[in-house]
Image (cartoon, helix red, strand yellow):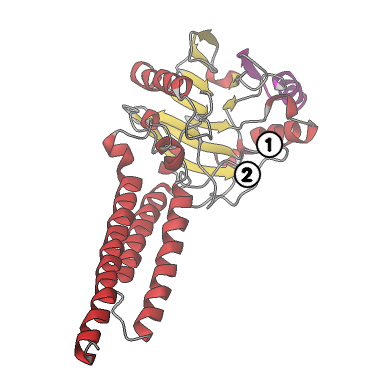
Amino acid sequence: MRSQSALGRSTASVPSGRVERTRALGWIAVVVVAMAAVLSLATGVLGWSGEKGIAQVVALRTWLLWGFASMAVVALLTALVIGSRGRRPARTISVALVCALAAGSHLLVLDSRGLDAGLPLDAADERDGDITVLTANVRGERAGEETVSAIVDLIISSGADVVALPEGQPVVDEVVAQLIGHGESFQSFPAFGAGPNRGTALLVAESLGTYREVDGPVGGVRVVPVDGDGPPIAAVHPTSLPPDPTADLGAWRSEGSQLRALFRTMTGGIVAGDMNATLDHQQLRETGTYVDAGSAAGIGGYGTFPSSLPGVLGTAIDHVLVDRGRFTVRAGAVVDVPGTDHRAVVVRVAQR
């Protein structure tokens, strides 16, 4: 019969091996979480923001913030339970720290852009030389009378001089007609895209001078002044980023490249629209002398899509960018518009 001491040594060796394997797997999990945290923060720097799967994740920085924050809380609570049982929760605490640092880093980025919707802009506050720019995706043929009226009211109340209406081609005539009824004069430049949701309309106040249309990016319209000293302007609407992480991104990348080319070649201008990209995607990281007016106004981190979610949970894909060599940003606001799944962005800039 086996001795008691030998039996003890035999049975003790099994759980010891399991413990070592569990510890190793635990530290591997810590490394995996740490790598995920670093990648979520560094995709833009690494140039990976246009890759399949990564591009979709990059678009959800607010969700990454809340996701890592939730994981940090869960890991911390788990560590407290483990500690209360007399065990050392080193790995669990490590996960909590990594997740907390990742969440904090994402928060700092969003906070630097602005997590507030801002105050409504008033036409009465516009000064000589100011230009107020409005962009609102109105959902094409799905836009009803309520949406059109809300856009017209917003144009008038904010004193907008430049209005970009992605998916606005089906309703631009009605918008202009209502503006005329209110005594407002705008030049209208509708772009006829492939399908009702690709036609982008651009309105330019006659106070900026006469404009003519020139070649612009796919899904957008670009105009230059014929007389006066108004800036060149482009209303843009590149194709949307497929939600399927395995889908082909060729069209999205190609039209994003056109957007980057616009920033390189259109000096001293204004670019506004539904860009179907966040400031973390490559097409809005390589903007030359152009800056995101929303971020300069403290509203750049507030989600514009979908409008059904609170702004702190949404994604900011509607933007106004201006050439910093010509403009300074005075104010901005993100505004809810009934009947559309996007929020409008309104900014006021002053010419240097």
Instruction: Indicate the amino acid at tag 2.
Output: Ser
Q: Picture quarter containing residue 189?
A: top right
Q: Picture quarter containing residue 162?
A: top right
- Element type at mark 2: loop
Image x and y of residue 145, in percent: 79, 31
Disc 2 + disc 1, Cβ < 8 Å: yes
Crowding at dot 2, Cα within 10 Å, few <14 / some 14-19 / many 20+, comes out as: many
Residue 9 in view here: yes
Image x and y of residue 39, in percent: 32, 46
Image x and y of residue 177, in percent: 76, 21
N-terminal of the pair, mark 2 or mark 1, is 2
- Tell me: 282 left or right of 168: left
Residue farthest toward the front in the current orientation of the protein: 1
Compared with 123, 129 (above or below) is above
Q: Which mark is residue 340?
A: 1
Q: What's the CA distance linking mark 2 and mark 1?
A: 8 Å
Image x and y of residue 307, in percent: 63, 44
Instruction: Indicate the amino acid at tag 1.
Output: Thr
Q: Residue under circle 2?
A: 307
Crowding at dot 1, Cα within 10 Å, few <14 / some 14-19 / many 20+, comes out as: many
Start-end of magenta stretch: 172-193
Residue nearest the viewer, comparing 218 with 73 = 73
- Element type at mark 1: loop
Picture residue at 73% right of the left edge, 24% below the top: 141
